[in-house]
Amino acid sequence: MSTRKILHLDLDAFFCACEELKDPSLAGKAFAVGGQAGRRGVIASCSYAARQKGVHSAMPTGQALKLCPELIMISGHHGNYGAQSEKVMKIIAHLTPLVEQVSIDEAFMDISDLPQDWRRSPGICNKGWILKLTCHVPWVARPINW
């Protein structure tokens, strides 16, 4: 029995990455996608600048705003997230048909049968384990050996 090479793909800060594509002025700013503080909202995704201030996913919005008063809150554009996710999954499908998407921003990808130089495929730039696609949505690949 041969060992399979499976990558877990996690589109890091995916909702925020989509928002930056839509509004490039958000780049480098502390912002989050989530619900309103007065309505028991929570942070669904936050930018790296917000993370540096202690904000994280699943945090109550009120708490996030106390940690980071300058935090820009965005309600979200879920239709856009779905469209961006489809773009990413199509790029991944060009590498291997053995992809199992488990959520809007996660998938498992079997790379066992790919040639050793698959990281040089069009649309992919490899920097360690951080891979970026040409659609500019950041994602992280984590190796899983089964």
Image (spheres, grey):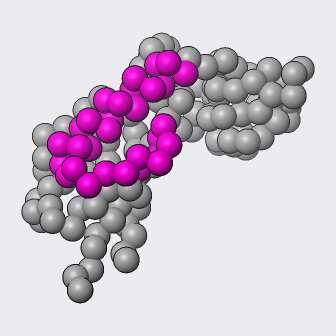
**Residue placed most toward the observer, 123 or 67:** 123
Does residue 99 appear left or right of residue 113 in this picture?
Answer: right
Residue 42 falls within the magenta-colored stretch = no
**Main secondary-structure element of the magenta-colored stretch:** helix
Percent of width and height locating residue 26: 53, 19
**Residue placed most toward the observer, 23 or 76:** 76
Looking at the image, can residue 66 be seen? yes
Q: Is residue 33 above or below residue 67?
A: above
Query: Number of numbered discs present?
Result: 0
Residue segment shown in magenta: 78-107
Residue 91 falls within the magenta-colored stretch = yes
Q: Residue at x 45, y 26 (%)?
A: 82
Percent of width and height locating residue 118: 14, 56
Percent of width and height locating residue 96: 20, 52
Q: Residue at x 27, y 80 (%)?
A: 3
The quarter of the picture where the C terminus appears is: bottom left
Q: Quadrant of residue 1?
A: bottom left
Percent of width and height locating residue 141: 38, 55
Q: Residue at x 66, y 34 (%)?
A: 44
Q: Residue at x 19, y 38 (%)?
A: 123
Looking at the image, can residue 130 be seen? no
Q: Quadrant of residue 11?
A: top left
Q: Quadrant of residue 142?
A: bottom left
